[in-house]
Amino acid sequence: MDFHGWSGGLALRPRDYLASGGRPLLDVVRASGPFRGEELRRLALGTAATLARLHLAGLAGLRLGPGNVLIGPYGQAFFAPGPRDSEFPSHDVRAWAEVMLFAATGREPRPGPGSGSGLGAGSGPGPGAGEEAALGGVLGAVIGECRRPDPGSRPTAAELVAALLGRPAPATRLAVERLLREADNHTRPDGGPHLDGGPRSEGHSPSDGHRRFDGHPLPDNRLRSDGRLPFDERLPFNDRLLFDGHHRPDGHDRSGGLGRTPGPVQPVEPVVPVYAETLMSTPLWRRPAFLAGVVLGLAVVALCTAAVVLVSALATSAGGA
Amino acid sequence: MKDLALGVLVGIMLGVVAASLALALADLPAARTTAAVHVHPYD
């Protein structure tokens, strides 16, 4: 039984949601200035991957903002707990773009009307409109896509990760998991193996730095030859990955497989993805399928009981007559 | 599917218990009357 937002009875443990020991992005940027270059791209990738994991687990309406995106001691990004709203994942994507703009520029955007503590939920362009163009590159283009007024035309979080990694838009859960695994390899605290076999960057200890990113270098050739983003070829909105990663009806995986990407072959290591640790088994009594079964069983018994009572009443009245 | 089957099983058990209790309680006044007629030693 597969329900939206649930996968085999697994839901997110709040590790991605309940950060410990992190500093708010707001404080980090105020103290150390805006994020630049590779640092910014890794922050964008890490937060987009976390957002994608949460969306895949059915968690949306996160009210993202510089105050509740936390930077861990190794530079990893978490989302602080807070009240969620009933908004759609596309609003989270827009808020993510505003947070990235803040991280890149250090200028705090005004909260949109009705956006609560989050940012960018307003319908009009915020004070950062046009700034994404100044960022340039894939990140600027991605942020521009995320800030579209029409929520339906914004990319999903999984597509964000794909675009930041220079991959095609994922169409299956397997493709999304591959993307998230690759994103983990790029952003995990220990830096992962380097493609060139060179030494890992040194210099920052966990205690002296909160913006340490020394994983894989991200690919630079992520814009297509016509300057458009990979997810311009994305699926229709109702067929895209929001909460579920179901296979398309035609079974066609548009991811194309990461192994078929031209260029140098990246080393594939059999690592357990970091996000797997965020999964824990949901108690049986909280699983939607179980609850649906209980309701079904109660309904069956109620129907049987009603039938017995009805037949008994009819027999009594017939005997009395 | 396993969760659903377990849920149905638990639901049926809960329903049987609840229905039994309900029917028994609904029949309690008649049972008391019957008991009073046949069992009370001072009648």
Image: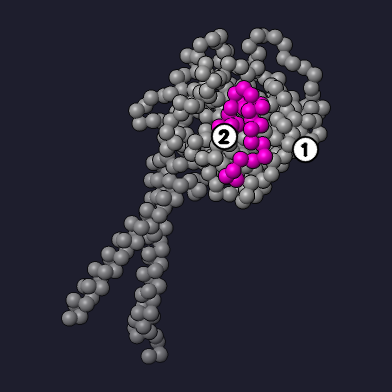
The scheme the figure's colours follow is: one colour
The answer to which image quadrant residue A272 occupies is top right
Nearer the camera: disc 1 or disc 2: 2
Q: Residue at x 34, y 85 (%)?
A: B37
Q: Residue at x 70, y 35 (%)?
A: A102
Badge 2, how many Cα within 10 Å: few under 14, some, many 20+?
many
| Image: A157 above or below A225 | below
| Image: A298 above or below A247 | below
Left or right: where A118 falls relative to A257:
right
Q: Quadrant of the N terminus of chain A?
A: top left
Tell me residue B3's x, y (percent): 43, 44
Tell me residue B35's x, y (percent): 37, 81
| Image: B40 above or below A106 | below
Closer-to-camera residue (A87/A314): A87
Amino acid under label 2? Answer: Cys
Q: Which residue is mark 2?
A: A146
Closer-to-camera residue (A150/A52): A150
In the image, are marks 1 and 2 on the same chain? yes
Q: Which residue is mark 1?
A: A27
* Magenta segment boundaries in residue numbering: A122-145
